[in-house]
Image (cartoon, grey):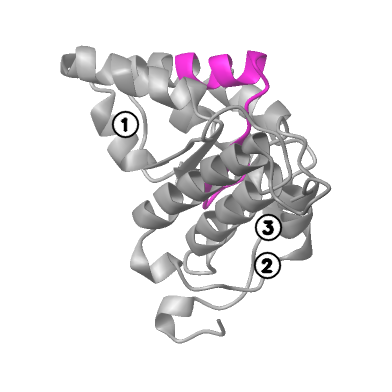
Amino acid sequence: MPSSSDDTPSARQSWLEERWVEAARRFDAKTPVIYQQEIEFDERVSDWALGNTGSSSLFLTGPIGVGKTHTAWRVCRLWLENAVGPGIPWKGSPVIATTRATSLFDALRPDAQSEGRRLIERLQTADLLFVDDLAAARASDWTRERLFEIFDERYINRRPVVITSDVLPSNLTEIIGPRVASRLAEMCRGNVVLLDGDDRRKGGNR
């Protein structure tokens, strides 16, 4: 970070540093152990994280076992370092919300009521939202409406998302509904990355 003339950080610089350290600590604490290991990125993925202005989104797709989820966790961490690291102004500690689609769909069930509403608001307003394995389950009509609330709010406020899925955005309509699929396709336009390779869980190259 830039320093004052006597090389002593200003009060604002120290505050920004503390906010970033807290955000990094919070994200690292919730990162599953298996995804804490550093991995090599596809160049398009690192370009997104390092050049992201805060509004474009990233869609990672490819066969089962090629490392989509691991890549997503690490790219979220890289986004955090680049977008809100020391020396970059930010108001407060940034929040990265993470969820698996199966858990999300279950949490948005009709009987969730106040808990579901709080979850929707949290996912709408997080600085970055990561949804893992979006094609893992088919959403009900009720859940599709709640997903629309989440993605539409992020769409109109230009808040980025990171999505992993075994299928392309164009094939998600039957799973999440046409309105959500349409917004997601636009949000991720130009940043749909196909990861390929062997199934790592079966001993493929890492």
Residue 133: say if magenta.
Answer: no
Residue receiving disc 2:
41
Q: Foreground: 118 or 173?
A: 118
The residue lying at 35 percent from left, 67 percent from top is 33
Q: CA distance from mark 2 to mark 1?
A: 29 Å
For residue 184, above or below residue 32: above
Q: Secondary structure at mark 3?
A: strand
Question: Where residue 190 sits in the image (x, y, percent)?
Answer: 80, 41
- Residue numbers of the magenta segment: 149-168
Question: Where residue 159 sits in the image (x, y, percent)?
Answer: 63, 26
Q: Which mark is residue 105?
A: 1
Please name which of the two marks, 3 or 2, marks the residue nearer to the observer.
2
Question: Where residue 52 sits in the image (x, y, percent)?
Answer: 76, 41
Disc nearer the start of the sequence (3/2): 2
For residue 93, above or below residue 110: below
Q: Which mark is residue 96?
A: none
Residue receiving disc 3:
194
Q: Is residue 53 left or right of residue 169?
A: right
Residue 63 visible within the image: no
The residue lying at 44 percent from left, 21 percent from top is 147
